[in-house]
Image (cartoon, grey):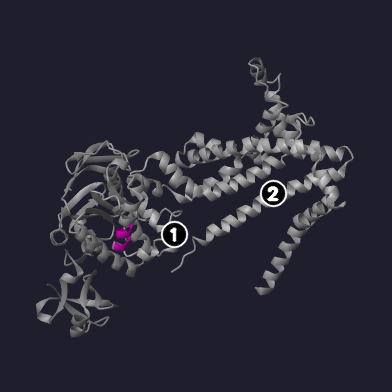
Amino acid sequence: MRGRSWLLRTAVLAYVGALIALPLYFVFQRMLAHGFGAFARALGDHEMDSALWLTVRVALLAVPLNVIFGVGVSLWIVRHPSSLSRLIDTLVDLPLAVSPIVIGLSLELAYAQNGWLGRPLASWGLHLMFNYWAIVMASIYVSIPLVSRQVIPLLREVGTHQEQTAQTLGAGSVRIFFTVTMRSLTWATAYGVTLTLARVIGEYGAVLIVSGNVAYVTETLTLNIGNNFDNFSPDQGFVGAGLLALSSIFVLLVLGLARHRERLRHEYRP
Amino acid sequence: MSIVLNNITKHYGADLVLDDVSDEIPSGSLTALLGPSGSGKSTLLRIIAGLEPHDGGQVHLHGRDVTTVAARQRNIGFCFQDYAPFNQMSVFDNVAYGLKVRRVPAAQRRREVDDLLGLVRLSEFSDRYPRQLSGGQRQRMALARALAIKPDVLLLDEPFAALDAQVGAEMRVWVKSLQRELGITTILVTHNQSEAMEVADRLVILHRGRIEQVGPPEQVYDKPATDFVHGFLGPLTTWMGTSYRPHDLQLCDDGDGLSARVVDVVRLGFEVRVVVEREGATTWVQLTHHEARQFNPVVGSLVSISAR
């Protein structure tokens, strides 16, 4: 068995190394290829900074909306099962299976000014394509299942006894939601937020289609990276790519440390 | 604080789970709702707590009709079989929860929680989290949490089922003495006959949603009102066409009983189970170790059996 565990370990390390660690290393290497001075200058690139700021603004709206939706839909699916909620349960997973480019195209068909929904909305003065709102919509769409997939299994496992106990102790439903339900779901939700955040700031295909990709207006950080490669400035592109990778690693690290501290307080001490 | 149940009826879909259940639970008593699984006993407990809606009948707590009162306003202490600890809160915060809801000032809250933790012998565990406790400690925490709101009644759903045998036995003795000390009207649900008879001063036997018999444990055991109660409260065996408890039969000298052939002898600690056969029917005789030694039944030999 000892020999086999050695084999397994080597296989996993080689797999992760070849697919994730090594390529990521080269991104950081290229990011700093011309030294720290050049890197600092590239960080000050106005177009990239504008794109970064747009990505932040999109995440600030899309992530909270998806957390609220994700927790809400999870409660509905687990606590009030019906044929409709089971249908929603399946439907919510759809964005994981559908290619982002199809998501982008379907949103454009529906919401562009001559689209089925876009036309009446436009007559109300609401334009939802090729602007900030379009990017938010696409970001929400691609990341919709990421919170509920974390929350639903935990919600099933936790059950309703804690909440019913809180009821008998006199607590109202709002208090129970925040002091009992959400406290059980904190870590599942936090992990869902991390995945959603990573997905939202990293989305390319769907956003490329619905945004219009206009510099300083609808160009997100991922689009900016792509545009830099298309415009023969790969060095600037690698700085953007490195930033994106660093932010993801940072978010995962913070979550991992917090989880570790949380786990310590739940270890059984006889 | 008495609990009065008037004609409680409950369906799950087409299934009738409680069929016209009425009872009056005297103030200060420790009543066991005893029945096999599916008898409706846990459902009845949840209806008393207001955690489950029912179809017909009323629940009165101390003369107050609480049928339409929400669980949170019934002032009931409820403990689930799994104790439902708030895992994200310390033991202290678990016990303090109901007091916080009731806006008890912090200083008084601390005093009351400390007293309760002393009562359930968890004082030194106040900063721990539920997952760091053993099963028995978790149960005591859940009891303290339920008692913190000074409930009018205490409802316990299968309180000892999740504990291993030894801890369960200790907790039974402890819960019984705690209930006596506090004098709080208590209902506990159990499927375990010996547990009910050990802890409760009053049994309510439920079977298929109906009450079969109500009374003190000795009375219900000695004078079962129905065949179901007779069979449920202890093992039965048949001897010459009549039902007996196995310990109500004995081995005797040859002239005093009817003979039977020994089929099996099983030693269970202090007790000895002798299985005999007569005219094709098998019978189980329960003896003490001493009694068995007196007659020394051996598989294949003939013994004489009589009723005590």
- At mark 1, the secondary structure is loop
Give the numbered dot on residue A248.
2
Q: Position of residue B166 (x, y in %)?
A: 33, 70
Above or below A267: residue A62 = above
- Residue at the spot 71% in from the left edge and 37% down from the top edge: A53
- Residue at the spot 34% in from the left edge and 45% down from the top edge: B103
Above or below A38: residue A109 = above
Identify the amino acid type marked 2.
Ser
- Residue at the spot 83% in from the left edge and 54% down from the top edge: A29
Is B116 one of the magenta-colored residues?
Answer: yes
Please state the chain letter of the residue tagged with numbered disc 2 in the rendered image.
A
Is A59 one of the magenta-colored residues?
Answer: no
Going by the picture, which residue comes out furthest to the top? A123
Above or below A108: residue B266 = below
Q: In the picture provided, is B61 more to the left or to the right than A168?
A: left
Going by the picture, which residue comes out furthest to the front? B107
Above or below B113: residue B59 = above
Q: Which residue is mark 1?
A: B129
Q: In the picture provided, is A7 more to the left or to the right than B115?
A: right
